[in-house]
Amino acid sequence: MKTRVVVVDDSALVRSLLGEIINRQPDMQCIGAASDPLVAREMIRNLNPDVITLDIEMPRMDGLDFLARLMRLRPMPVVMVSTLTERGADVTLKALELGAVDFVAKPKIGLTDGLRQLGDEITEKVRIAARARVQRHVAPAPAARTGEGVVVDRAGVGTAPGPAGHSAAAAGGGLLGRLSTEKLIFIGASTGGTEATRELLMHLPADAPGVLITQHMPPGFTRSYAQRLDSLCKVSVSEAHDGERILPGHAYIAPGGRHLAVERSGANYVARVFDGEPVNRHKPSVEVLFESAARVVGRNALGVMLTGMGADGASAMRKMRDAGSWNICQDEATCVVFGMPREAIAHGAADEVLPLPQIAPRLLERLRSTVGLATSRV
């Protein structure tokens, strides 16, 4: 059965082009095109599509307002297709927060040729969206940042306040403060991962081990994403920079269009951010990050594979486990798309498979259970 798509865009040209792109695919059909959200509302009600593509800037009702109402009243897979997503990363992130499965940025110039060149990307994201699990969304509240733990560096010395006002710690802090000088957490994610990663990070205390994250995102979006997470989480969150020391109480996100890996520099872990060929069609690639975790961090690593399409990172996550890491995969029921966790599980990479809300508590429990073991595993 073909995937039935409704296109919502105020541009007649874009509606025509997207319809043409969709109808060229043997497994999908554009069953309707709406010029604004009010027309779209009736079309969705009457035609019951499997997926809609949605512009952001439209007459009569803003696309984000329409998305918010849609996901509250009739949750369904949505792929954002808008010029605003390219220059307005905050708008894109808001759309993902509201429940959009993914997004495609319209080209700035050469709209007709540009959209046709994006045809494969658009239709692939429609296919993924059609299989996605869509749920009603509750907006996150910022996490408190004082009195929530300690941040201790690898030498056991209290760090200065972080860039977002994280409190400093005295030397020899609490249990996680000591363990965080030895351990690192590695997270890989793709479709649906922006919100899954947000939920996980929001439940980590300020004295958590350093966290390295590869989320499939294009250039221009990861800095805004990191700033958003930093405003919500107890740990400091930033885009990773090449050569910077990886500190407890901090999370580092691979910049869009660049790979992220971890290396050793003396007694410290440092981030390596570099250009290179895509791996598993992705840059950044989870495979690159997880392979470095297996090679450099070994049994001091904790790996997490979150929602996403494809198999990026699955074989490297198995290498992590073979090197002694403790790995968790998100379960199917809480994934937007179960592809990446499923592949990691099939590779024998998972020690546990858990619902998303249980992953952060289990990571902390695992850390506490390794008291006395970490110092021999650096």
Image (tube, rainbow, N blue to C red):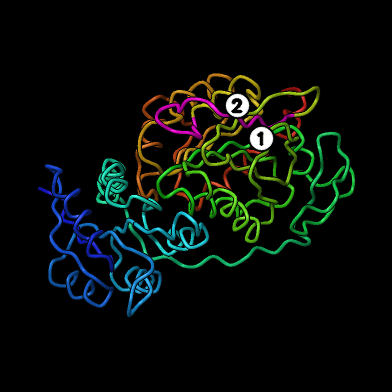
Residue 47 x, y percent position in the rendering = 13, 67
Dots 2 and 1: beta carbons under 8 Å? yes
- Alpha carbon distance from label 2 to label 1: 9 Å
User: How many marks do you count on the picture?
Assistant: 2
Q: Which labelled disc corresponds to residue 184?
A: 1
Residue 225 x, y percent position in the rendering = 56, 53
Return the residue found at the far front. Answer: 110
80 vs 229, left or right, is left
Residue 102 in sight from this viewpoint? no
233 and 276: which is toward the camera: 276
15 and 142: which is toward the camera: 15
Q: Which labelled disc corresponds to residue 293?
A: 2
The answer to which image quadrant residue 49 occupies is: bottom left
Please provide the residue range marked out in magenta.
Answer: 269-286
Q: Earlier in the sequence, mark 2 or mark 1?
A: 1
Residue 152 x, y percent position in the rendering = 82, 43
Q: Which labelled disc corresponds to residue 11?
A: none
71 and 126: which is toward the camera: 126
Q: Residue at x 50, y 42 (%)?
A: 215
**Under tag 1, what secondary structure?**
strand
The answer to which image quadrant residue 65 occupies is: bottom left
| Kind of residue at badge 1 | Leu
74 vs 226, left or right, is left
The answer to which image quadrant residue 46 occupies is: bottom left
